[in-house]
Amino acid sequence: MIKLLVVVLSILCIFSLAYSCPPSDRAALLAIKAALNEPYLGIFKSWTGTDCCMNWYGVSCDPEVHRVTEINLRGVSEDSIFKMAHRTGYMSGTISRAICRLNRLSSLAIADWKGISGTIPSCITSLPSLRILDLVGNKLTGGLPTDIGQLSGLTMLIVADNQLTGRLPRSLTNLSSLTHLDLRNNFIRGTIPRHFGKLRMLSRALLSRNRLHGKIPKSISHIHRLSDLDLSLNRLSGRIPPSLGKMAVLATLNLGGNNISGTIPITLITSRIWTLNLSKNALEGNIPDTFDRRSYFAVLDLSYNQLKGTIPKSLVSASFIGYLDLSHNHLCGLIPEGSPFDHLEASSFVYNDCLCGKPLRDC
């Protein structure tokens, strides 16, 4: 009877070991935990026991091989632990290099904790299965790993709202699977890589509020799936490539707050773009008089430029213009009557040279 009990217990022990995470993954997770300090919610209290695949908060494993594949730790969440605490999360510390020992990791999200500092571990580029890297909303410094292009399967790179510096790595353009790139609100400098257009799968490219300079690469227009391009609030110069207006699915183009010069390409007015912000640049010349019934703009902001001439009469032919701002230019002449002008306020036209008519003074 005792021998039978020993055999049964041995089988159960072997079964348990076979279906729990390996000690190496558990040790890596505990090293990650040791480098972080989360004082309010207690999210790491569940990180106990030998099986890190069983009810460890934010940790997911492959059900077949029982290796850690996902870490999802977010400081803003609808999870009950946040609702009970009636607060968002705060965490300090750094992201440990131990993360790189989780060689089956496909998704890493340590986001919106406000206080996590240090650099992005350079060894992260050695994770062959990584698909999602989301480190938004922390205090990370340093630059993106120079060889980040090795992550050939990466689909989402989100590091917005940090304090990252340095230049955009040349290898960035090797991320052939990337669909979502969000680098907003950092201190990244240098130029946008000339071959940025190699990112053929990209649908969103959000690079606003950095210190990028130089010209907008013409190769961007080769990204046929790109629907949202935000390069605002940088130090970009040169002219707007007309080819941007020929992109099939580009719906949002935000170039506001740069040093862009030249004229407004006609292609932008006749494009499928429906949110167009070119404000606070050095654009000159006339506003293209090429609006027609296919023109649909939820937002058309051309304010704070050096535009001259009259307001195009063809604007009244547009099927819809929700928000229009032509203020702070050098426009003259009569403001056209009819839609969209009948619902716009004076603030859309002020600080021009000699505009008149409703909603401004009579001519």
Image (cartoon, rainbow, N blue to C red):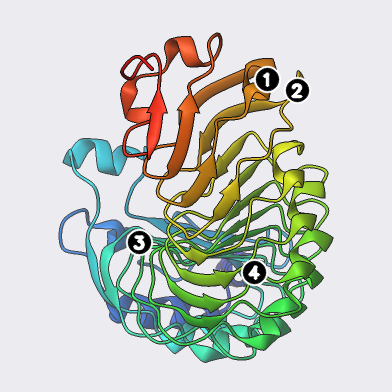
Disc 2: which residue: 292
Disc 1: which residue: 318
Disc 3: which residue: 137
Percent x, y of residue 249: 78, 42
343 over 329 or under it: above or below: above
Q: Which picture quadrant has residue 318?
A: top right
Helix, strand or loop under label 4? loop
Amino acid type of disc 3? Gly
Which of discs 3 and 2 lies nearer the camera? The answer is: 2
Helix, strand or loop under label 3? loop
Query: How many angstroms separate mark 1 from mark 4 (CA)?
Result: 28 Å
Percent x, y of residue 118: 32, 84
Q: Earlier in the sequence, mark 4 or mark 3?
A: 3
Left/right of residue 23 with respect to residue 327 in the rendered view? right
Amino acid type of disc 4? Ile
Which of discs 1 and 4 lies nearer the camera? The answer is: 1
Disc 4: which residue: 216
Percent x, y of residue 136: 42, 62
